[in-house]
Image (spheres, rainbow, N blue to C red):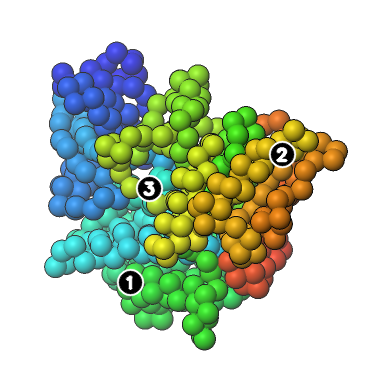
Amino acid sequence: MTAKDTVLFGKYQLIRILGQGRNGDVFLARHLELDAYRAIKRVLKSSARCEQFRREALLLKRLKHPCIPIVYDLEEDSQFSYLVEEFLEGDSLYDLVQSRGPLNQDAVIRYGIQICGLVQYLHSAETIPILYLDLQPRNLLVCHGQVKLLDFDRSDTLMEANEVEERYGTEGFVAPEQRNGGYLDVRTDVYQIGAILAYMSVGAPQAEGSGMTLPGELGSIIRRCRQADPDRRYASADEVAEALGGLRYGANGQRLIQIPSLTIALASARAGAGTTHIAIGLACWLNRQGYPALYEEKNRSGDVRAMGERLGISADSYGIYTIRKLPMMPRYGDAVQLAAHAYPTVVSDYGTEITEAAGAVSAAREAGGKAVLLIVCGGKWWDGSSIETLSALLSDAGIGAEEGGRGGLILLYNRVAAGALSPPASLRRCRSFKVPYFADPFRPEGEAGSFCGAVLAGHMRDGEEVKGQWHAFIRKITSWGSRGSSA
């Protein structure tokens, strides 16, 4: 079953193979009548795994969670049994870490809390807890900042899991009681949550009993999760989530880790100033630093759709195009209803709509979020009139010297020539930067990367002392991480 023109059961058009694993193959298919994507798993009916395959289907039918695939159908033919599921889009946690390396503590906490929520749902969805039993990076999907859970072929109720003689697990993530035939319960999944937290932090599986000591409070949480004795672990996934949430604040209530939403709005007083180029560069830089960020097209250029068409890329179910690894949201009308993404940072490109950009920043702050307004100015001597227009527009929007002094308004001078005009008197308290030349906005490296870091300094600060201690530790064990076993 490899041909693209294969149609299963008269309605599922096969597109490509998504994966081949221990239990069979997974295909991407399109439902012809509904024009919707599906994931189709298949296993040989003669396989010893076939009964477990059917049990997985029946288990998934009972679960109702937006981050767990929906089961649509269970089919069979003369050779295979088929499980037709919702197609969940995104990159596996394994691929994410392989491409970026260890995640920053901010991301580890954010993803960790989501994983705890999914595991706790399984443990509490029915009277008898459902144990997942194979938490590992390839089974966790990250889609636009949201973690989703795949592959329930090892999952079972607590009672049935303890009756199975043959047990399985993934090296580097399997709990001791799974190895030695001990009693399995919700704390078995808690152990694996700790192993996932360690993997995200270090960039490789941490072998059981390796003797490595991860620093700080996050390291303490990981060690408690991964205790060999289940009685010494957290009693539930909820307790782990609570402990992770506590890392956002110190003992005095001061925030240590900054995880609220951040709106970065860019606009210019005239067309052609380079706003889109700079906005893409900032969004790409943030993602490379481990801060998931979405580029949002708020202007009327239609550039995102044009890029997608040029590359043969379509928007996903969130309405987002992923172009050269950057998630990009084109401008949609107010009537379009899309699934909510979970990006903590949004870089909004307003083009020449300065008033709209200023209004969005004000609205974000009123809602309790963080926001910064970046104004792109022309750097040539003849740009004086547009800068004066800029000053007037900002004044009309209630933004001036006081706003600039608080760091909420930043001026970016692009294509600066000798003798360029200085900011108007009303804006001279603003932070100002010269934009370095960088040809490819999707690769803000060298001087361009330093520029992005300088512009956003103070807005992405997330507990520098804690972060610095953690990153120093990661640098020490880089050589160990490259020797660790793969997930």
Residue 156 image position (x, y, % from top left): 23, 57
Sooner in the amino-acid sequence: mark 1 or mark 2: 1
Q: Residues within 10 Å of mark 2 (few under 14, many from 20)?
A: some
Q: Quadrant of residue 217?
A: bottom right
Residue 357 image position (x, y, % from top left): 49, 47
Residue 326 image position (x, y, % from top left): 52, 38
Q: How many tags in the picture?
A: 3
Q: Residue at x 40, y 26 (%)?
A: 314
Answer yes or no: is residue 54 visible: yes
The residue lying furthest to the right in this view is 418
Q: Which mark is residue 384?
A: 2
Q: What element does badge 1 sit on?
A: helix
Q: Which mark is residue 341?
A: 3
Residue 467 image position (x, y, % from top left): 62, 67
Q: Please, what is the three-letter code of the amino acid marked with disc 1? A: Asp
Sooner in the amino-acid sequence: mark 3 or mark 1: 1
Q: Please, what is the three-letter code of the amino acid marked with disc 3? A: His
Q: Nearer the viewer, mark 1 or mark 2?
A: 2
Contact flag, marks 3 and 2 (Cβ < 8 Å): no
* Distance between the alpha carbons at the discs numbered 3 and 1: 23 Å
Sooner in the amino-acid sequence: mark 3 or mark 2: 3
Q: Nearer the viewer, mark 3 or mark 1?
A: 3
Q: Residues within 10 Å of mark 1 (few under 14, many from 20)?
A: some
Q: Is residue 380 above or below residue 340?
A: above
| 351 left or right, relative to 10 | right
> Which quadrant of the figure contains the N terminus?
top left
* Distance between the alpha carbons at the discs numbered 3 and 2: 40 Å
Residue that numbered label 1 is attached to: 238
Q: Out of 194 and 408, give the one closest to the viewer.
A: 408
* Distance between the alpha carbons at the discs numbered 1 and 2: 58 Å
